[in-house]
Image: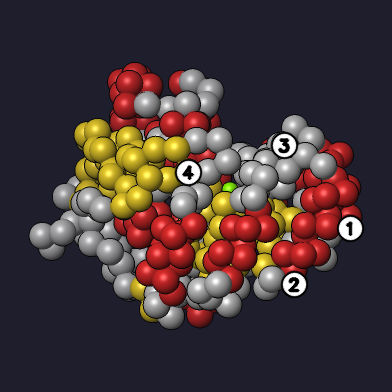
Amino acid sequence: MELTYKPFELQLKHTFTIAKFSRTSTPVMLLQIKHEGETGYGEASMVPYMGETWDTATEFLKKVDAGQFTYPFDFDEIGDYLDSIAPGNTAIKAGIDIALHDLDGKLKGESCWKILGSDPAQMPVTSFTIGIDTPEIMRQKVLEAANDFKVIKVKLGRDNDKEIIQNIRSVTGAPLYVDANQGWNDRKKSLDLVYWLQEQNVLLIEQPMLKTDYDGNAWLTERSPLPIIADEAVQRLPDVEKAKGAYHGINIKLMKCTGMHEAAKMIAKAQQLDLQIMIGCMTETSCAALAGAALAPQCDFADLDGPFLTSNNPFKLPEFVDGKWVLGDEAGLGVRSLDQ
Ligand code: MG
């Protein structure tokens, strides 16, 4: 097995602002793993607030012995091996895991979604995220998104949450997801806001309070008429069990949980615990988005808009119809370079 990689600076269409951060590009590592004439494509999207960089990824990759990846792949064993190299580094671990899944599908002549047991007919719509910006630019972004997307996701968590929603409501009545990104801190005010948001056709709330405030999030979840979904509070498999009681559901992101294999286990665990499931993404290319899309039919909500937020995606944009990713029949993930 031959593992190669190259850093790539993924440019964002608009400056992306959430409750605490702002940026114009995302460092990405693009990976290829080759075996018996087939190439698996992988991607690590390293958003700055998660702490990984091209340097940490390169350092990690130098320690990886691709000879450990013997075919047929034992993904449990591979996951344990990667975790044994270093804790953390979840995005670059996900990049390797995605490349191996793509390669696995190609070697089997089967699409990844089929191997993972997904039913394309169950594909949920994908929300499109509007970052915090001036009211005029936010209205413009909403109007741009209105043709392709059925649900808009809005980043809240500052002191002008109602104004932001009213601004969006001045141009569309489309259903909304709200992501507070841990920005709320007063329980009673948060609950009042949730009821108000429900009247505004908001369908769910992501990570209302600090990820460390288990009791605060649990208090709100117990009383909220809308599903409360954990995001920052849940990264890997053991966190799923901890979310039970404090949230109605979890948001799974491949870059936080080390990739498709662990994500599939988190989905199974969440279903067992009767938690709702959202599959999310980072700003990323079609490669990682296709990896998420392969699992999305097993989830209740999808937030896989990454490639749409970027301006130099090095891969073809997969088919997107009626607000949903379309899963093709190609072997592997269906990642195609622009010249293919
Ligand atoms: Mg979030």
Which disc, if any, is residue 210?
3
Q: Is residue 133 left or right of residue 244?
A: left
Which disc, if any, is residue 254?
none
Quadrant location of the C terminus in the rendered image? bottom left
Residue matched to label 4:
17
Mark 1 or mark 4: name the one nearer the start of the chain. 4
Within-10-Å neighbours for mark 2: few <14, some 14–19, many 20+: few
The three-letter code of the residue at mark 4 reads Thr
For the residue labelled by badge 4, is the local secondary structure a helix, a strand or a loop? strand
Are circles 1 and 3 on residues that touch, CB within 8 Å? no
Query: Marks 1 and 4, how far apart in space?
Result: 29 Å
Query: Marks 1 and 2, how far apart in space?
Result: 16 Å
Q: Nearer the viewer, mark 3 or mark 4?
A: 4
Residue matched to label 2:
199
Q: Is residue 153 left or right of residue 85?
A: right
Q: Position of residue 227 (x, y in %)?
A: 75, 61
Query: Marks 2 and 3, how far apart in space?
Result: 25 Å
The three-letter code of the residue at mark 2 reads Glu
